[in-house]
Image (cartoon, rainbow, N blue to C red):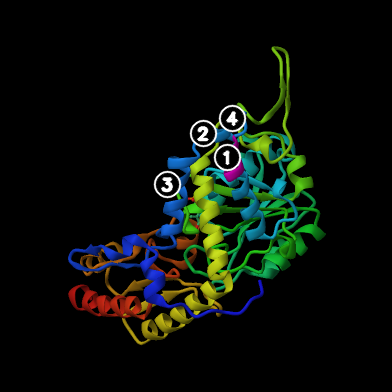
C-alpha cells in the first residue's frame, strides 16, 4: 500500500472512540486487549445506527425502496472489503459470521468435495484453535491427516520443516499470516509459492495480519484468506472469506437456505454462484455495513500509517519490557506486530491480569486459543498486551508501572 505515512494527532484519534472516555475503577482506561477485540470508532457506530434508523430492510429479496437501499449498502461493504484486500473481483468476497466461520466454511466445503481419507493438511504449531479444530473435524469425519510445522524458538516458522511436510497427498496448507500470541507474521507469499509448487491450496488465517498491515491477496497469490470484523474496529458477527474465484467456484455450499440457490424444486436444487452460494439465509446486514465503515475508516487513516504508529509503540514497549528482569517475553524475532505475550516470574498470568485490571490496564491471560503453541513454548498460559491505533505512550507507561507493582505484590 502506498501513500504518505501520517502521524496521528492522538487526542483526536482517541476522541473518535467514545468508550475511551470512560474510566476503569476510577482510573484512565488502558485497553490493551485489542488482539481479542478492538474498540469501535464513531464512524462505525454511526454507520450502523444510520442503517437502522434510515435504510433498514432485508437485502436482495425486496423490490421496494428500503430493501434496495439496504442491498446497496450491503453490497457496497463487499466492494470495500475487496478493495481493502486488493481482491481481483467483488465476487471473491464472501461474508461470514467471523474468522472462525470463514475457516469452517473452507474445511467443510473442501471435505465435502476434495479431501478424503489419507489426504494431508499442513498446519503450523502456532495456529489459533479456529484454524485447528475445523481440520481436526475433517480428520475425524474423513480420515484426513494433519501435518504440523514447527517454529523456531524466536517464533518464526521453520521453512525447512514446512518444505519437508509436503507429499503427493497434500491438499491444502492452512497457516496464520500472523500469530495472535507472538505477533509475528509468516512469509505468506513464500509459503504460497511453495504450496502451489506442490499442487496444494494455500489458506491464510488473516485475522490478525489484516489489522496490523496491508494484506494484498493478489500479491500474496493465496487461494483463500479469512479475516474477522471485530478485530478490525468493526462489529462482531461478521467476517470475510476471500477466495480466488476459480477456487470458490469449485467449492460446494456449506449451509443451505435462501439466497444461495438458483432453482429449487421438490426433486432437486441448483446453486447460486459465489459469493452468494455461501451466504445462506438473511446475512448479517448491519454488521456488514459496520465492517464496511470500519475498513473505509482504516483506509482513510492509512493502513500503513496505523502499522507505523503501532510499530513505534511496540518498539518502545519492548525496550521498556526488556529492562524488567522479572518479565519473560515470547516470540523475540524481528518485525513484531503490537501483540506481546509475556509472563512475570513466579506469578500466574491470571493473577498478573487481575492486578493490572485493578489499575485500569486490560490485558488478556490464558492460552489465547493456541494450546499447541503454549505446549511448544513450554508454558500453560501467558499474559498478552496488544495495541491498536488509539494506544499511546501513556498506555505503555501504565503497563510498565503496573508490572512493577505486580512484581512487588507477587514476585
Ligand atoms: C481472533 C482470531 C480468530 C478467530 O476469529 P473470530 O472472530 O473469533 O471467529 C482466528 N484466528 C486468529 C489468528 C485470531 O486472532
Of the residues under marks 2 and 1, which one precedes in the sequence? 2
Which residue position is annotated with label 2? 57
Residue located 57% across and 40% down the image: 69
* Of the two numbered discs 3 and 4 in the rendering, the one whose residue sits closer to the viewer: 4
Which residue position is annotated with label 4? 64
Quadrant in the picture for the N terminus: bottom right
- Give the SS element for disc 2: loop
Kindly report the distance in space between the C-alpha atoms of the residues bearing marks 3 and 2. 13 Å
Q: CB under 8 Å between callouts 2 and 1? A: yes
Q: Assess disc 2: are there few (<14), some (14-19) or many (≥20) residues with their C-alpha within 10 Å of its C-alpha.
A: many
Magenta portion: prevailing SS class: helix
- Give the SS element for disc 4: loop
Q: CB under 8 Å between callouts 2 and 4? A: yes
Kindly report the distance in space between the C-alpha atoms of the residues bearing marks 3 and 4. 21 Å
Which residue position is annotated with label 3? 49
Rendered location of residue 52, percent (x, y): 44, 41
Of the residues under marks 3 and 1, which one precedes in the sequence? 3
Rendered location of residue 73, percent (x, y): 57, 45
Of the pair 186 and 343, the residue shown nearer to us: 186
Q: Is 112 located above or below residue 9 in the figure? A: above
Dot label at residue 69: 1
- Give the SS element for disc 1: helix
Residue located 23% across and 64% down the image: 23
In the image, which residues are magenta?
Answer: 68-74
Amino acid at each position: 500500500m502506498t501513500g504518505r505515512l501520517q502521524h496521528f494527532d492522538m487526542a483526536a484519534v482517541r476522541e473518535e472512540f467514545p468508550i475511551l472516555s470512560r474510566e476503569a475503577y476510577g482510573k484512565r482506561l488502558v485497553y490493551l486487549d485489542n488482539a481479542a477485540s478492538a474498540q469501535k470508532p464513531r464512524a462505525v457506530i454511526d454507520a450502523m445506527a444510520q442503517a437502522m434508523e434510515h435504510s433498514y430492510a432485508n437485502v436482495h429479496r425486496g423490490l421496494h425502496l428500503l430493501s434496495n437501499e439496504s442491498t446497496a449498502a450491503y453490497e457496497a461493504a463487499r466492494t470495500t472489503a475487496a478493495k481493502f484486500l486488493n481482491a481481483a473481483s467483488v465476487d471473491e468476497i464472501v461474508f461470514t459470521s467471523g474468522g472462525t466461520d470463514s475457516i469452517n466454511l473452507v474445511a467443510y466445503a473442501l471435505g465435502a468435495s476434495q479431501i478424503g481419507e489419507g489426504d494431508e493438511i499442513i498446519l503450523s504449531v502456532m495456529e489459533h484453535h479456529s484454524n485447528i479444530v475445523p481440520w481436526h473435524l475433517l480428520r475425524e469425519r474423513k480420515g484426513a491427516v494433519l501435518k504440523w510445522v514447527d517454529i523456531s524458538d524466536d517464533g518464526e516458522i521453520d521453512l525447512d520443516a514446512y518444505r519437508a511436510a509436503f507429499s503427493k497427498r497434500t491438499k491444502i496448507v492452512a497457516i496464520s499470516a500472523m500469530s495472535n500470541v507472538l505477533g509475528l507474521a509468516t512469509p505468506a507469499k513464500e509459503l504460497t509459492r511453495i504450496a502451489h509448487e506442490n499442487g496444494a491450496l494455500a489458506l491464510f488465517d488473516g485475522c490478525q495480519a489484516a489489522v496490523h498491515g496491508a494484506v494484498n491477496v493478489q500479491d500474496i497469490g493465496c487461494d483463500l484468506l479469512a479475516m474477522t470484523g471485530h478485530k478490525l474496529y468493526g462489529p462482531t458477527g461478521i467476517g470475510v472469506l476471500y477466495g480466488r474465484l476459480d477456487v470458490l467456484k469449485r467449492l460446494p455450499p456449506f449451509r443451505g437456505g435462501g439466497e444461495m440457490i438458483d432453482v429449487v424444486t421438490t426433486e432437486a436444487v441448483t446453486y447460486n454462484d459465489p459469493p452468494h452460494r455461501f451466504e445462506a439465509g438473511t446475512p448479517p446486514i448491519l454488521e456488514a455495513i459496520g465492517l464496511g465503515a470500519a475498513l473505509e475508516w482504516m483506509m482513510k487513516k492509512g493502513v500503513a500509517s496505523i502499522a507505523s504508529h503501532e510499530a513505534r509503540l511496540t518498539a518502545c514497549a519492548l525496550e521498556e519490557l526488556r529492562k524488567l528482569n522479572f518479565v519473560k517475553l515470547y516470540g523475540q524475532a524481528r518485525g513484531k506486530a503490537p501483540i506481546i505475550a509475556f509472563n512475570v516470574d513466579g506469578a500466574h498470568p491470571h493473577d498478573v491480569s487481575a492486578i493490572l485490571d485493578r489499575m485500569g490496564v486490560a490485558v488478556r491471560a490464558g492460552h489465547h486459543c493456541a494450546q499447541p503453541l503454549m505446549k511448544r513454548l513450554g508454558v500453560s498460559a501467558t499474559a498478552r498486551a496488544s495495541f491498536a491505533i488509539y494506544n499511546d505512550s501513556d498506555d505503555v507507561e501504565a503497563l510498565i508501572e503496573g508490572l512493577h507493582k505486580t512484581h512487588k505484590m507477587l514476585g
